[in-house]
Image: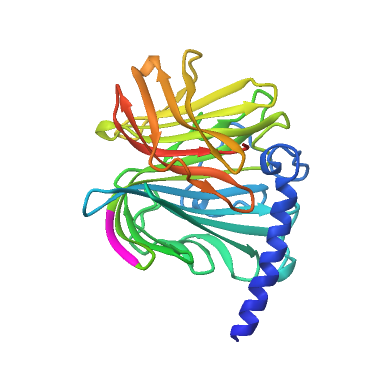
Amino acid sequence: MSAERISRRTFAGGIAAFAFARRAGAQGYAGLGDTADGFAPVTPGKVFAFPGDHGPHPEFRIEWWYLTANLTDASGAACGLQWTLFRQATQPGPQGEGWANQQVWMGHAAVTRTDTHRFSELFARGGVGQAGVEAKPFIAWIDDWEMRGSERTDDRTLAPLTLRASGIDFSYALTLEANRPVVLQGDAGYSRKSERGQASYYYSQPFFRVRGTLSIDDKPVNVSGQAWMDREWSSQPLSPDQSGWDWFSLHLPDDEKLMLYRLRQKDGRENLFGNWITPDGRSVEIAAPANSLTPLAMTEIDGRKLPTSWRVSLPGHGLAIETAPLNPRSWMGTGFSYWEGPISFTGTHNGVGYLELTGY
């Protein structure tokens, strides 16, 4: 039984790694700018429905369940963690049974402190029970990593949840609570990515409160803090002339939240998008041309120069801050690599959040 399980994991992982590697070498970051003939389009006006939209959307090519947490331990030391499940369809059409299923799954988990950044990666093939998502009762899993609901989980808040993952030299087990509904990003959940019509469906739960245990090198500590989960799906979220993005999720004072990202084009132009989220959960799209994201400091990792510190200016909201990474070497050296790590910020507003840099 053990040998069969290892064999299946190895086989599924090989297929999945090959599929994702093909995308990574394609046009645009990880092939996200490829045309998506045969897959479902993203169009304005979608009416979100829960719990159904917490589950998978296999008619779309790409999807993720993405959680980041800013935590402190009992001594007050800061740390962060990431839990992500990606789904990608290798081809459109009716879903195949068993090993003929065209869904490929990938999981990323990471923990970060000032002195270390640890990460792990899993691959799975759909249709054989090794990975997947169910909307009710909610569970997202790949192997023994899982984000799990219970009979108490509210469809509107997607809480409470338990979360767990582990790598060779780290693990965590957390409980997540929230008392406000999920928030639609972009224009009522329709998130534009370019002027050519590329877009995604996008909502978040930025109000998670977290408690649990994090262990690095078999040394467990109790942690608590706040977390942010993004749900996004699309068939072509980038245009072919876009190379990647710089994305921020920021926990502001008094429970306000800010999601902001810059999409970079290969000719050097940029598109800036985001949403300001009030303490009661109202989401206002940010589209003023006076807003700006400006790199302040670079970190070199594996020959790449990455902008890990930033100045963020939103004059219409009275926000002018500078961000700093908890660990500037928070590089995810996974199948298609990127930078992902906790940050803090000061200025007109003080707080913590997460930064993601792709396509470098």
Image coordinates for residue 256, horizontal then vertical, percent: 31, 32
| Magenta stretch, residue numbers | 219-223
The residue lying at 39 percent from left, 65 percent from top is 217
Image coordinates for residue 108, horizontal then vertical, percent: 53, 55
Colour mapping used in the image? rainbow
Left or right, 355 with reference to 30: left
Left or right, 161 with reference to 10: left
Quarter of the figure that contains the N terminus:
bottom right
The answer to which quarter of the image holds residue 354 is top left
The residue lying at 68 percent from left, 40 percent from top is 32
Image coordinates for residue 150, horizontal then vertical, percent: 37, 64
Chief secondary structure of the magenta portion = strand
Q: Is residue 45 visible?
A: no
Relative to the observer, which residue lies in front, 266 or 316?
266
Q: Is residue 360 magenta?
A: no
Quarter of the figure that contains the C terminus:
top right
- Of all residues shown, which one is farthest toward the bottom? 1
Where 211 sits versus 330, above or below?
A: below
Where 171 sits versus 338, above or below?
A: below
